[in-house]
Image: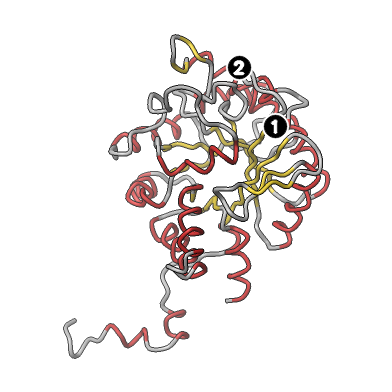
Amino acid sequence: MYFPRYRARRTRKTETLRRMVRENHLRVDDLIYPMFSAFGENIKKEIHSMPGIYQHSIENLVEEAREVHALGIPAVVLFGIPECKDSVGTDAYSDTGIIQRTIRALKQEVPELTVITDVCMCEYTDHGHCGVIKDGDVDNDSTLKLLAAEALSHAQAGADIVAPSDMMDGRIAALRETLDDNGFSHIPIMSYAVKYASAYYGPFRDAADSTPQFGDRRSYQMDSANRLEAIREAALDVEECADFLMVKPALAYMDIIRDIKERFDLPLVVYNVSGEYSMVKAAAAQGWIDHDKVVMETLIGFKRAGADLIITYHAKEAARLLQDS
């Protein structure tokens, strides 16, 4: 197959031809929309570093969830901003916690929408770390007990999927055992299997009010230089009976997405994180890029790398663009 007898441009000539030979496709069913539920009433607070994304009180979050469902987006993932925080994140596993109340409201008002819950402690602790602090660091095994209690409380409130994002060792097994022992063997676990200690999370800290009050999270989140470690992490979660695997962040880690997709047959989720979203918004505001084209090119890039599902703050925008295409 050599030029001039073979000409690759033949199948690029028209939009119809390009559509016919397109290898990867983005669908609205591939999208998951993150939402931030805040304690209080009549709250719709735009996150300064994430234009178009809001902290909502429950009644306003329900209204946006109706919009999400009407666009055909199948699922949301919930993050909570509680009234009070303490050293052990009590609100995370309280029956009356902000996320537990939000789940109940969503399942009552938008029952067809799949509700995924973030299972972690950082949004609920006064120190901003993802677990119990001992000797200046997060204690792994003490934290597992709290994560299991949090996941169980979410399931009891009506969550469809629990998604642990803490990166503690052994967390999938701990959650699976607790859920199974309490009558929730049907609840899937979407594991943040490969979560890097990333500077791309910056705006999320504003959104969830979860900035660590000391140190950083490098003792439990992964080193961005490591590839083989990601495969080991994912393999551990598969052995512990995770139902989905996730790579986070997505944009700078497409090689890792491909690695995980090629080695494991579980559904693969990627998280198009806050910093990735905000960079697109900032560049578009300056007129440096075409916002809509960059959004869609980025999302199809995740699909091409191997993603089955994409958690993205662009989900509503992408759903509308897909409707118009």
Give the distance between the C-alpha atoms of the residues marked 2 and 1, in whole angstroms.
20 Å
Is residue 319 toward the left or the right of residue 192 in the image? right
Tell me which corner region of the image, top left, top right, bottom left or bottom right, holds residue 38.
Answer: top right
Residue pictured at 52% horizontal, 69% vertical = 292
Where, quadrant-wise, is the C terminus in this rendering?
bottom right
Q: Are marks 2 and 1 in contact (CB under 8 Å)?
A: no
Amino acid carrying label 2: it is Val
Amino acid carrying label 1: it is Ala
Crowd tier of the residue under label 1, counting other residues whose Cα lies within 10 Å: few below 14, some 14–19, many 20 or above? many
Residue pointed to by mark 2: 88
Residue 124 picture location, percent across and down? 62, 26
Where, quadrant-wise, is the N terminus in this rendering?
bottom left
Residue pictured at 74% horizontal, 38% vertical = 103
Residue 120 picture location, percent across and down? 57, 29
244 or 63, which is in the foreground?
A: 63
Q: Residue furthest top?
A: 135
Residue pictured at 45% horizontal, 32% vertical = 237
Reply above or below: 214 against 241: above
Residue pointed to by mark 1: 155
Crowd tier of the residue under label 2, counting other residues whose Cα lies within 10 Å: few below 14, some 14–19, many 20 or above? many
Residue 108 picture location, percent across and down? 83, 44
Q: Nearer the viewer, mark 2 or mark 1?
A: 2
Reply above or below: 176 against 86: below
Q: Give SS at disc 2.
A: loop
Q: Give SS at disc 1.
A: helix
Tell me which corner region of the image, top left, top right, bottom left or bottom right, holds residue 198.
Answer: top left
192 or 312, which is in the foreground?
A: 312
Mark 2 or mark 1: name the one nearer the start of the chain. Answer: 2
